[in-house]
Image: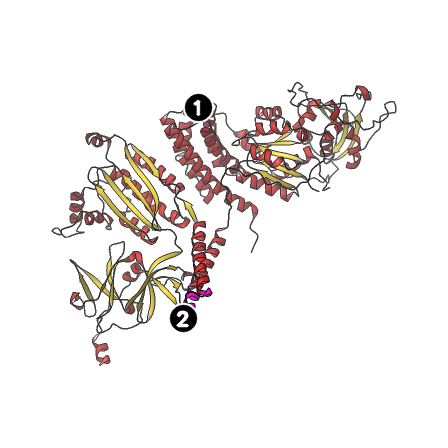
Amino acid sequence: MSLSILAVDDSRTIRDMLSLALTQAGFSPNLAEDGVHGLEVLSGMHPDAIITDINMPRMDGFGFIEAVRGQAAHRATPILVLTTESAPELKARARAAGATGWIVKPFDPEKLVRALHMVAGPGAAR
Amino acid sequence: MTTPDPMAEIRASFFIECEELLEALQDGLTQLDSGEADDETINVCFRAVHSMKGGAGAFGLEDLVRFAHRYETVMDEVRAGRLIPDHQAVLLFMRSADVLSDIVRYSRDGQPIDTGAVEPTLRELEGLVGGPPEELEEEVTDFQPLTLDLSSGDTSCDTSFVVAFRPEPELFRSGNEPLHLLRALGELGDVSTEPDVSKIPLLDELDPESACLSWQITLDSNRSVADIEEVFEFVEGLCNLEIEVQTGPSDAGSVGLPSVPGLPDLIPDLDGGDAPEQTPFPEMDTPRPRLTLTDPETGQTASCVATDPLSQAQPPRSSDAPVQSAAAPKKTTVRVDLERIERLVNLVGELVINQAMLSQSVARAGLPSTSAVVQGLEEFMQLTRDIQDGVMMIRAQPVKSLFQRMARIVRESSAAVEKSVRFATDGEATEVDKTVIERLADPLTHMIRNAVDHGVEDSERRLAAGKPAEGCITLSAAHRSGRVVIEVTDDGGGIDRDRVKAIAIERGLIDPDVALSDSEIDDLLFLPGFSTAGQVSNLSGRGVGMDVVRKAIADLGGRVSISSTPGEGTCFSISLPLTLAVLDGMVVNAAGEALVMPISAIAETMAYREEDVRPLGPETQVLHIRDSFVPLLDLGVELGFRPPKPSYEGSVVLLIASENETRGALIVDTIHEQRQVVIKGLQESYGHVPGIAAATILGDGQVALILDPVDMMANAVGRTRPAVSELQAAG
């Protein structure tokens, strides 16, 4: 079984790219369009890791992470933040909200996969 | 079917998304300008630009990233409440959105960006917040695709590293997991890992959420310190990490990452009852076990101790089946390859034809109208029509995007002639065939420019006429009896008919003493070469006249008309078919062939009357209609079906008024019916055939050519009188 990933981003392009990169790496991605949608999708799955954007309508990434961390089942689920800024304060804020790590957009698929393995382990694929 | 390159597909879809985002941006800015904005409005604008930047980065569209970034930075100031945009600022935002949309288009088409407007706009934008932000060099260069060789191939230049890794409790709270980090480290080379279990307290004193384990890892690798640090990137500040490089026997430089404790405790304490029991520990008194992490499975055993509290806190995993989200309030859309739709449209066309043929054979069979077959067929016809309508609607798009482009034209052209013009739209949601929308952009642009340039008066004259200084141009769309009507209305001075007439006379377009009705004078505007601008302004005088507009709209099967009231304004009305796939045609017969003439080209039909015909050349004649003469053509002759007939008595004449004012009287033998026909292109099989636009299949299965009257008249031979030799041959 490969890693199951929940990816939340309001940009269709980024969702498409995440989906492509994750599928090519043998992961099974579930996609959501914003924080609210992300929580809805999350309620029916238990992902090995979550990837989320920050700037989103309805519920932004910070709100989403806090909501996820508030659920006992997802206290330790690794969450990677997708950010266009590599500014240290943004990373600090993501971490303060409970993120596990971050990926700077535009992401390199290999780096994304490595980061996922770094926080979620190898999955059963290996 | 070939599998398309997934990245190329995503790229194409990115540009579609950009169009949507630009639309959302325009909407938001319009709201900001009208004062209807709330807090979310600026967020929507910001996110639109932000999303474009994010996607653009993925495709290496540096210019787009750069502009979007700096635009977004200024917008972020508005979002943060540090900048309150006034009307001028919002106008600047709109112009920036225009530049952004240009860059998007250039990027999409792979053309070099015309940087003329980029830098000044950015400077103006940044003037709002007092200078440019810090360069984003760091960000741009941040992304270097790393080619990573995961095999630890060449070990000849290996360095020995000693990594001391001591997690803080916060590391676990952030969802990080030492096991995975150690394993990732193991990928860099040969590792031997030694856990330090000395900090593990007795079981009854154990806090399952604390961090008790630490590790010392010896790594033989050809990688650099930076590669090792990258593994620990996410836990920087959440652990104590020391990396020592052992170059030979003596220890050399050591790199340390300081621990930054004190992150807020974000996770409520575990309910005691939920805390899992610790797995057995290695004996405390026995010498420390030395675990070699060459096998990942062994590594798992080693680090289980530290990671258990959290990993076991998770409930058993439910199935990974994707879950349908609850219905989102958003309108959901499906992206479909245009080719598939074309195929469907074609198939439905076939279906319509097939159904018509079936009806005819049923009618021929003479079944009573009460029979099940006839009744079933009627239902079938209804369904076919519904399916046809439904399929046509797939290609339909709201005109909103087109209207937004026109908003920009108004902005730019009113600035160019220094007039103050407001732009209003109505019926943005009206749906029209995608191709029609695309091909409407140019003529509409021209009409809008005209309205700004010639329609709306300058402020002084407006004020003198008792009107508000700001002019208004309204663009509206509506469905009316199976067609789409698009209107460009200005509240200007109306058409100065005396002047129009004077110009037309001056240019030799009309006879000085001809009497013309108001609408006939208005129609003069559509004559080729007509231009009312006393001097060539920035906008007009590009060699494009209203005749070109009329031609473009006629090519879409549409018509343009003008209505104007002096002092109150002018309205240009465009009436278009809903789709290009079907056509309203008149089925006529010439020399035994069924032919279809587009209804839009027919001005009137009349019986042929010998007394109205005047000879012109040896073989050509003209028809006298009211005050004018139009060339008389025989459709059968023009298509080469027959030589001219000695007499056309009993024939029918179609008066063709093409949009470029060339007129002709076309003789046909009979008129059958007026009907919608499905257009079947001939270009692919035959190339361009003069006088023929396309073909269709009639209800009886017969193929009929659809005529292109403009093309036909341009190539007309015009023979309607038999040559002397032919007369002699005929006896």
Disc sitting over residue B131 in the figure:
1
Q: Calculate the distance from the C-alpha at mark 2 to the C-alpha at mark 1.
A: 82 Å
Figure check: B578 above or below A73: below
| Highlighted magenta segment, given as a residue range | B356-373
Mark 1 Cα shell of 10 Å, populated few (<14), some (14-19), many (≥20) = few
Q: Residue furthest bottom?
A: B731
Q: Name the residue under label 2.
A: B364
Task: Tell me the quarter of the image containing the N terminus of chain B.
Answer: bottom right
User: Which label is found at residue B546?
Assistant: none
Helix or strand or loop: what does disc 2 sit on?
A: helix
- The overriding secondary structure of the stretch rendered in magenta is helix
Q: Is residue B141 above or below residue B590?
A: above
The picture quadrant where one finds residue B274 is top right
Q: Is B569 positioned to the left or the right of B355 in the image?
A: left
Tag 1 secondary structure? loop
Say whether residue B68 is magenta.
no
Side of B315 relative to B386 (left or right) = right
Q: Nearer the viewer, residue B124 or B347?
A: B347
Which of the two discs, 2 and 1, labels the residue nearer the N terminus?
Answer: 1
- The amino acid at mark 2 is Arg
* Residue B295 appears in the figure: no
Instruction: Give percent across and percent down for residue B710.
Output: 29, 58
Q: Is residue B505 visible?
A: yes
Q: Which chain carries label 1?
A: B
Q: Label 2: how many residues lie within 10 Å, few (<14), some (14-19) or many (20+)?
A: few
Q: Position of residue A71 (x, y in %)?
A: 65, 29
Name the one closer to the observer, B45 or A83. Answer: B45
Q: How is the image coloured?
A: secondary structure
Can you tell which quarter of the image residue B423 is in? top left
Q: What amino acid is labelled 1 in the image?
A: Gly
- Quarter the C terminus of chain B occupies: bottom left
Magenta includes B372?
yes
